[in-house]
Image (tube, rainbow, N blue to C red):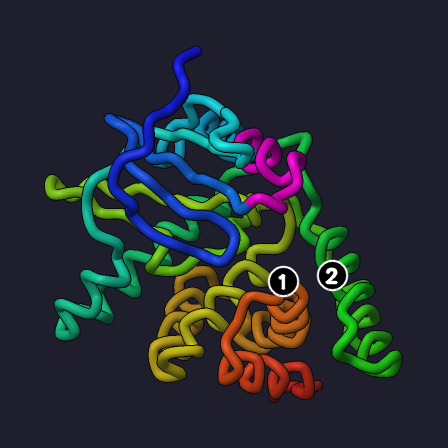
Amino acid sequence: MNELKLGNLISEGATVDVYESGDLAVKLFKPDAPKTVVFYEALMNSKVEETGLSVPAVKEVEIIDGRWALASELIKGSTLEQIMKDEPENRDAYLEDMVELQLDIHAKTVSGVTKLKDSLREEIENLDIIDHIKRYELLTRLDSTPKHIKLCHGNFGPENILVTNDDKVYIVDWIGAAIGNASADVAKTYLKLSLTSTEMAEKYMNMFCEKTGTSKKYVQEWLPIMAASTLAKGIYTKEEKELLLTWLDVVDYS
């Protein structure tokens, strides 16, 4: 196998940097990235490919200068996040497109991957910025939720939707994917959107609930759990942390 040659830097992140390499996009993980995380993402992406969802195909896993690298099909286009910024007048229509995409994801299921409730329980148990009373409340809430086996993206948002020049749509970043409750996945999307616009987040949740006949209260009950999960991952600004902490204190919804 020829070593991948890194070209232009596409994006920088807290855990990975993404480069062009010919017709490939190469995720170059930080030096301390566990091997298991790299291969889990490759496995999860491959399983999602088999469902027929539109995702960049995984091509290979390598080590480059001592860092793990995951190479996938290079998709050239713009993120939906950027498109929404460029076309604010069409934002609601794009939000509706997002809901439809997320419903397509939830219509799938895969075997042999992480169960969402298991990963959420582990994250809450290890979250060291909450006291034992709050931890007990969150775990009790989690244990009371129904068990579902729908495919959940785990980090679904406009920044992880790529649109090509000929309007083909691809969903990327499947490292947090698991099988579980669709409303948990929507609650995570709500939190992501609310970090920049509460109005947009509310519209998104309302659209999902209307299209699926889901009680809004049912989705909202997941918000403290998903806020705790986001905090456990440790990737946030000071302002985002403060907002997420406020969601931990929301107990009941009417």
Query: In the rendered image, is residue 222 in sight?
Result: no
The kind of residue on which mark 1 rests is Lys
State the residue position of label 2.
Answer: 123
Q: Which quadrant does the C terminus fall into?
A: bottom right
Tell me the residue that label 1 is attached to: 233
Q: Looking at the figure, which quarter contains the N terminus?
A: top left
Residue at point 31%, 41% (across, down) = 170
Residue ID at (43%, 78%):
194
In this rendering, would 41 be left or right of 112? left
Q: Residue at x 44, y 29 (%)?
A: 49
Dot 2 surroundings within 10 Å: few (below 14), some, or many (20 or more)?
A: some
- Residue bounds of the magenta highlight: 31-43
Say whether disc 2 or disc 1 marks the residue closer to the N-terminus.
2
Find out whether residue 178 is within the magenta segment: no
User: Residue 18: where, in percent of width, then height?
Assistant: 37, 44
Relative side of 9 to 83, left or right? right
Q: Main secondary structure of the magenta part?
A: helix
Q: Are marks 2 and 1 in contact (CB under 8 Å)?
A: yes
Callout 2 amino acid: Glu
